[in-house]
């Protein structure tokens, strides 16, 4: 069965007196990004939203899609097929492809489409049926030849089409696109717009923000919505645009690009008086009210399976007298619908978790920087430190040097976990945001899959590092001591990666690379390595209890030197620290308190894990403002 044949439900969107206020601390001075506009978008039509920069194009798309608009900042009426929009239901039958392309770069086109199919198709769909859908979508979007190519190697146009394909899997009747041809050349732009036109012809409602389309691209657009400073200047068929502008005194020169002329009018370059256009748009909206609705929930609009059949305006009439029925509606607060629980994906939470865990693990295994290079670096640095501090652990004369080795263990493992994460996670966080907002899966499921898929690498890397360095430096061959130090290293690796993920979720790469070391320096200074805790002033002594490095460092010291370790042999005539209990006492660490330090580290990890979850939650919240 073709993708077009699967499609059966049409959706017409209408809005009236829609206001959207920009965020501002001063409520009396809030700027209206959308200023009481009205309009409609029809199924079976490719609708283009035009206007100069700052006209309110993206704001309109965000509000209609339900991605933005919280509190009292959005007012007006939004109707779907003549009924008040239920955001919960509307989000199930719509998708939003943003201008920024957020995809996992290490997956192939086929893998990306297949995972999307697993999330968006019913769990009852067989593997062969999913494969047919994937092949068909790839064919529709012209991606057959690139199915085995990783996303990072695709061209700009192929990436745009792939971003469309992943949302096309469940055949959403409404599709929103924010500048889908931005950054593409003329050939790639034509390919993308042709695909969008074909999607609209199959019966979908397709809304596109497009910036100054060429004449050829403009021919593919069925309806135009022209905006200027948050006001609607025109909403209707693209073929009537020039005529409407002309009747209001704005005459388009012969052979002039219609879209360029419309934008010049919206910018005020063809005259400052736009009131006549605003009034005309409002008059036409009221004149056409009620022409595009189905009059009952049971009423459906059946479309031909022939995707080449152009969809005309939808007019559903009452059987009794064939008169057009317009459903009256009352003023609503749109935000009453925004607090409803959104259901994610047609598959269970357990299936969502499995798919996410499998995808995260696959990406981790393919990530040269995050996994291969990270493992190799741990091995190389461990060998280097092991040779530098060779057999220091067996000599009482080299206790201070061995003390430094333990500190650099903690230092390296932390940064080797945090820094790669801060470089890679911001991209993944954007992918999560896009997929979450398009109802692929819930935040808790993603969060759990993410932390568990990262766990193997957080264990493997410090384990390799410790096994090599521990033996080369001649540390005591007692299994319980090795396990104690290993546990500290693993917890430090988890702590570092969690911190990097939490900051990566809310910061970009450039800022994150600065913030991670900057925020860690105070923790290092209070760790007890540079200055003994008892030598700190009272204020800094209390502050040192907030340093996770203090607990990690002291737990590592106790693992190697504590718990009544036997006296060390001395290579010199006199060694001050043959008795390691004296050394522990001199550096101000309480012996026999290893598990207290471990509990403090676990508590810090728990706090950072909560911070990671809250960071992702905040990212979702911020995207809706």
Image (cartoon, grey):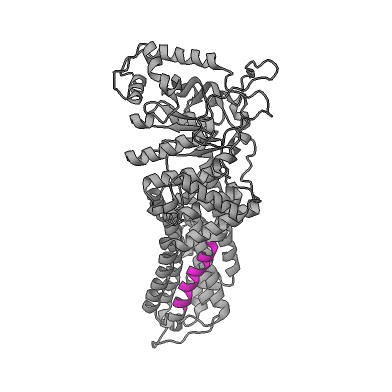
Q: Is residue 459 magenta?
A: yes
Position of the N terminus, as image quadrant, is top right
Residue 148 location (% of width, % of height) = 44, 57
Of the pair 178 and 433, the residue shown nearer to us: 178
One can see residue 625 in this view: no
Note whether residue 423 is visible: yes
Tell me where residue 588 appears, x and y as whole percent. 50, 68
- Residue 367 horizontal/vertical position (percent): 44, 61
Decide if residue 120 is on the left or right side of residue 267: right
Is 371 placed above or below 274 here? below
Q: Is residue 264 above or below residue 213?
A: above
Q: How many numbered badges does the structure rendering display? A: 0
Q: Position of residue 138 (x, y in %)?
A: 48, 48
Tell whether position 501 is magenta.
no
Relative side of 160 to 270, left or right:
right
- Identify the residue at horizontal 58%, vertical 46% (top origin): 120
Considering every residue shown, the one lying at the far right of the view is 320
Question: For residue 617, what is the image quadrant?
Answer: top right
Depth check: 190 or 475 in front? 190
**Residue shown at 42%/58% (left/top)?**
419
Give the residues drawn in magenta, as a range.
454-470
**SS assignment for the magenta stretch, majority:** helix
């Amino acid at each position: 069965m073709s993708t077009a044949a699967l499609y059966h439900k049409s959706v017409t969107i209408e809005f009236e007196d829609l206001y959207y206020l920009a965020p501002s601390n001063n409520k009396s001075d809030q700027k209206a990004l959308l200023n009481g506009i009205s309009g409609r978008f029809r199924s079976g039509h490719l609708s283009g939203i035009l206007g100069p920069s700052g006209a309110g194009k993206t704001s309109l798309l965000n509000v209609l899609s339900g991605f933005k608009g919280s509190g009292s900042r959005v007012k007006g009426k939004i109707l779907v097929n003549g009924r008040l929009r239920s955001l919960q239901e509307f989000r199930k039958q719509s998708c939003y492809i943003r201008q920024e392309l957020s995809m996992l770069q290490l997956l192939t086109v086929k893998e990306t489409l297949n995972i999307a199919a697993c999330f968006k198709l019913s769990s009852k769909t067989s593997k062969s049926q999913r494969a047919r859908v994937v092949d068909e979508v790839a064919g529709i979007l012209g991606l057959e030849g690139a199915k085995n190519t990783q996303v990072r190697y695709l061209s700009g146009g192929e990436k745009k089409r792939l971003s469309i394909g992943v949302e096309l899997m469940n055949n959403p009747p409404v599709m929103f696109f924010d500048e889908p041809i931005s950054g593409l050349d003329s050939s790639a732009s034509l390919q993308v717009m042709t695909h969008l036109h074909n999607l609209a012809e199959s019966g979908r409602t397709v809304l596109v923000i497009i910036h100054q389309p060429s004449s050829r691209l403009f021919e593919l657009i069925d309806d135009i919505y022209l905006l200027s400073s948050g006001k609607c200047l025109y909403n209707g068929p693209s073929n009537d645009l020039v005529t409407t502008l002309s009747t209001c005194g704005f005459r388009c020169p012969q052979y002039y690009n219609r879209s360029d002329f419309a934008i010049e009018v919206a910018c005020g370059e063809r005259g400052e008086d736009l009131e006549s256009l605003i009034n005309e748009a409002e008059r036409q909206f009221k004149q056409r009210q009620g022409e595009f609705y189905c009059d009952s929930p049971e009423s459906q609009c059946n479309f031909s399976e022939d995707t080449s059949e152009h969809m005309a305006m939808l007019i559903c009439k009452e059987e009794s007298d064939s008169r057009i029925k317009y459903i009256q509606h009352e003023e609503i607060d749109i935000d009453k619908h925004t607090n409803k629980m959104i259901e994610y994906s047609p598959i269970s939470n357990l299936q969502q978790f499995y798919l996410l865990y499998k995808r995260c693990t696959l990406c981790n295994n393919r990530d040269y920087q995050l996994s291969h290079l990270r493992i190799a670096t741990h091995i190389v640095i461990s060998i280097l430190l092991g040779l530098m501090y060779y057999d220091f652990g067996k000599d009482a004369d080299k206790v201070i040097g061995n003390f430094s080795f333990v500190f650099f263990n903690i230092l390296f493992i932390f940064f080797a976990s945090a820094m790669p994460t801060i470089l890679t996670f911001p991209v993944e966080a954007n992918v999560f945001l896009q997929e979450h907002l398009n109802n692929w899966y819930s935040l808790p499921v993603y969060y759990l899959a993410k932390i568990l898929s990262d766990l193997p690498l957080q264990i493997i890397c410090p384990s390799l590092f410790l096994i090599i360095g521990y033996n080369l430096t001649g540390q005591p061959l007692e299994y319980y001591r090795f396990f104690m130090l290993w546990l500290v290293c693993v917890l430090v690796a988890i702590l570092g990666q969690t911190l990097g993920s939490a900051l990566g979720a809310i910061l970009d790469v450039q800022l994150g690379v600065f913030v991670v070391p900057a925020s860690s320096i105070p923790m290092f200074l209070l760790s007890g390595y540079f200055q003994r805790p008892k030598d700190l002033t009272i204020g800094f002594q209390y502050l040192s209890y907030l340093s996770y490095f203090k607990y990690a460092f002291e737990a590592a010291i106790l693992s190697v030197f504590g718990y009544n370790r036997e006296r060390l042999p001395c290579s010199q005539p006199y060694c001050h620290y043959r008795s390691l209990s004296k050394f522990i006492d001199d550096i101000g660490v309480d012996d026999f308190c290893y598990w207290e330090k471990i509990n403090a580290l676990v508590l810090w990890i728990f706090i950072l894990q909560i911070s990671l979850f809250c960071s992702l939650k905040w990212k979702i919240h911020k995207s809706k403002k």
